[in-house]
Image: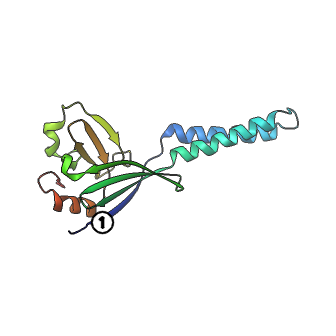
Amino acid sequence: MSDTYVECLVKAKSPLWGRLLKIFLIVLAVAFVIAMPLFPYAVLLAIAAGVGAYFSAYLTDVEYEYLYLDRELTVDKVMAKSKRKRVASYSVDRIEVFAPVKSYHLDNYRNRSAKVTDYSIGEEQQPDRRFAMYYEGGEKILLSPSEDMVKAMKNVAPRKVFSD
């Protein structure tokens, strides 16, 4: 059996609220440090604001790693380049269609109500390199795979995978 292995790492765009929250908590922590001589409990508030800033930065710095190995696509979530968590695993045999987001191959699926899961970069770029995958009829997954990964999946399932 021929094993095909392709790995792809994409950085998801940090949400605006996450960046604003991190900046706000850092400013708040600095303000409480400055207010320490006047207010004795400012130390606890400064520590709490600093911990909040750390966790807001930790939770919004997200990368997705796609791993294609022998007819199976695995998605891992990497948080702050330190913690990896397996999010999902998809079999190529159960994919209905895998095509670019704006492809005409998805026209039959546009009116379908499906749960949308976004593992892509999180924004539309020019040209848009995001792909939509309909999986077992009830799930729509958005991905941003590399060209090599699309080619490897197309070799296995040429009637389901399109690269337009």
Q: Secondary structure at mark 1?
A: strand
Question: Which residue is label 1 attached to?
Answer: 5
Q: Is residue 2 left or right of residue 80?
A: left
Q: Is residue 158 left or right of residue 56?
A: left
Q: What's the residue at 20%, 37% (across, down)?
A: 137
For label 1, the crowd category at 10 Å Cα-Cα, with few meaning under 14, some 14 to 19 and many 20 or more, is: some
Q: How many marks?
A: 1
| The image quarter in which residue 4 lies | bottom left
Judged from this view, the residue extending furthest toward the front is: 1
Q: Position of residue 134 (x, y in %)?
A: 22, 42
Kind of residue at disc 1: Tyr
Q: Position of residue 85 (x, y in %)?
A: 46, 50
Which of the image's four quarters has the N terminus? bottom left
Which of the image's four quarters has the C terminus? bottom left
**In the rendered view, would you say 158 is above or below 120?**
below
Q: 1 and 125: which one is in front?
A: 1
Q: What's the residue at 51%, 44% (across, down)?
A: 60
